[in-house]
Amino acid sequence: MADFVPVMLYDCRSLADRDRGIAAAIEAVKNGELVVLPTDTVYGVGADAFTPYAVKALLDAKGRGRDVPPPVLVGSRHTLDGLVYMLPTAARDLADAFWPGALTIVVEHSPSLQWDLGETGGTVAVRMPLHPVALEVLRETGPMAVSSANKSGQPPAETAEQARDQLGYAVRAYLEAGQCPEPVPSTIVDVTGEVPRLLREGAIPLEKLREVLPDLVGREG
């Protein structure tokens, strides 16, 4: 019989608990387990992007199929260059202007990447979050597949405790950092076509994006 592994919730508002929690989360991700961590939008449930069974566990925990691949969070702007064969100028300009922050950029990922995020059609949605706990974890784990920390159809968790209520024992470690300051989803821009296109309106408004990309096509376009 397998040993019982307890679910741990770490209060990252306490310095000692924060250090323990971040270390536990990094270890869990490297072992192919799931973690819940705060971001600058809503709490996310994440797994190592390059461990297929961990990504499958993430989709199973949320009750999603492979037809809804998770976005990928990165801990530095330069990581984006390693995920694509050639980074479009539009993607570089957006990342320089809004990362770290609440902007998700859809790019064509390099065909040589050894990962399986689901039915991506060769693209990946990438974001660098503006949250110190998330960045500290990501800089040690590398790219993580991260989706909102909730069951599909349920409201996104605004605390790690809310996430635990929904995801329970599917997750190895929960990192609590208090209520989300801005529980608004990230804005999503697709730069894989001839012109960049807004896919989802979120925390960063269209007008701000057009200051960087004047030819950005809005959802009405």
Image (cartoon, rainbow, N blue to C red):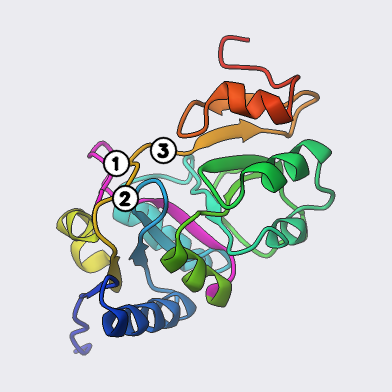
Q: Which amino acid does label 2 sit on?
A: Lys
Residue tagged by mark 1? 152
The residue at which mark 2 appears reads as: 62
Q: Is residue 207 left or right of residue 161?
A: right
Cα distance between the residues tagged 1 and 3: 15 Å
Going by the picture, which residue comes out furthest to the left?
A: 165
Q: Mark 3 points at which residue?
A: 185
Measured as percent of width and height from the top left, residue 52 is found at: 52, 64
Q: Which region of the structure is painted magenta?
A: 141-159
Disc 2 to disc 1: CB gap under 8 Å: yes
> Callout 1: few (<14), some (14-19), or many (20+) C-alpha neighbours within 10 Å?
some
Residue sitting at x 81%, y 24%: 194
| Tag nearer the camera, 2 or 3 | 3
Query: Overall secondary structure of the magenta stretch?
Result: loop
Residue 151 included in the magenta stretch of the image: yes
Work out whether residue 61 or residue 186 is closer to the camera in this orientation and state it.
186
How far apart marks 2 and 1 lie (CA) works out to 6 Å
Q: In this view, does 187 lie above or below 54?
A: above
